[in-house]
Amino acid sequence: MTKLTVTVITYNEGPHIVEALQSVSWADEIIVVDSCSTDDTVERARPHASRVEVREWAGYGTQKNLASALASHDWILSIDADERVTPALAEEIKALLRAGPAAAGYEISRVSYYLGQWIRSTDWYPDYHVRLFDRRVARWSAHTVHESIDCPGRVERLRGELQHYPYRNVSEHLAKIDRYTTQVAEQWSAEGRRSAAWQVLVYPRLAFLRNFILRGGFRDGHTGLVVSLLNSYYVFLKYAKLFEMQRTGKGARPAAAAGAEPPPAR
């Protein structure tokens, strides 16, 4: 049977980390790389992980590649602390490992729990990403934000889902949108991207129509409306902050420098 290492990067994830690690207790190995948390994340993680390392924050992709490099096994399942592997997904992965993986990577969808319900609409669902992969072939991009798996080999999809608990309330959601859009705008600025006033005006409206109408946010009622509006606000802030950086000449930083700060929770 192919051996599996689960990797998790953390920063101040005390309320989440135990349930995340318990959901993958069946794995052969669990590696946690913590970015100098100021809460009890490390203490909570140690009884449930094979290894816990504390390293300075270096950016999402770099930190996740470090976690993969520390693994004893080549097949990696990467999850976040606010995610849970469902029993159905666990059984699907175990069956795949018993048979021997035929692809280099596998996409897994996420379903998010927000304001008391599971959201199966908008840009939030099905939210497929490669999370199960062979580290000999695939690795995380080094981007400060929007990190993803670069997998030149064959990629397939699994049926099971990751359960995602992204925000406790709207206030936390808004705070995270503010922090994350700043990072996105800084990365775009460092890459030389530009924002025009018409983009600040048009793109958020298009994002709302895509989320609420085309991707069925209306099916989730009031909550679907809130998610659609906040997703469009996220788009507005990205372009507005980039536009501000162009006008003021402030905010553009090299990607390596931008990744030196502790990660915002996501």
Image: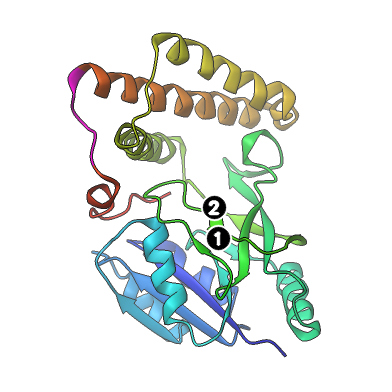
Which element carries disc 2, helix, strand or loop?
loop
Q: Residue at x 76, y 82 (%)?
A: 100
Q: Which mark is residue 83?
A: 1
Residue 73: x and y, percent? Answer: 55, 85
Which element carries disc 1, helix, strand or loop?
strand
Q: Identity of the amino acid at label 2?
A: Tyr
Residue 189: x and y, percent? Answer: 31, 32
The residue that label 2 is drawn on is 165
Q: Main secondary structure of the magenta part?
A: loop
Q: Residues within 10 Å of mark 1 (few under 14, many from 20)?
A: many
Q: Is residue 83 magenta?
A: no
Q: Residues within 10 Å of mark 2 (few under 14, many from 20)?
A: some
Q: Identity of the amino acid at label 1?
A: Glu
Q: Residue at x 18, y 19 (%)?
A: 248
Q: How many marks?
A: 2
Cα separation, mark 2 vs mark 1, equals 6 Å
65 up-or-down from 195: above or below: below
Q: Residue at x 34, y 39 (%)?
A: 187
Furthest residue in direction bottom, as rendered: 1
Q: Residue at x 71, y 32 (%)?
A: 220
**In the drawing, does residue 67 fall left or right of residue 20?**
left
Furthest residue in direction front, as rendered: 152
159 up-or-down from 92: above or below: above
Check contact, mark 2 vs mark 1: CB within 8 A: yes
Q: Is residue 249 magenta?
A: yes
Q: Which mark is residue 196?
A: none
> Which comes sooner in the sequence, label 2 or label 1?
1
Residue 186: x and y, percent? Answer: 30, 36
**In the drawing, does residue 200 fall left or right of residue 178?**
right
Residue 188: x and y, percent? Answer: 36, 34
Report the span colored magenta: 248-253
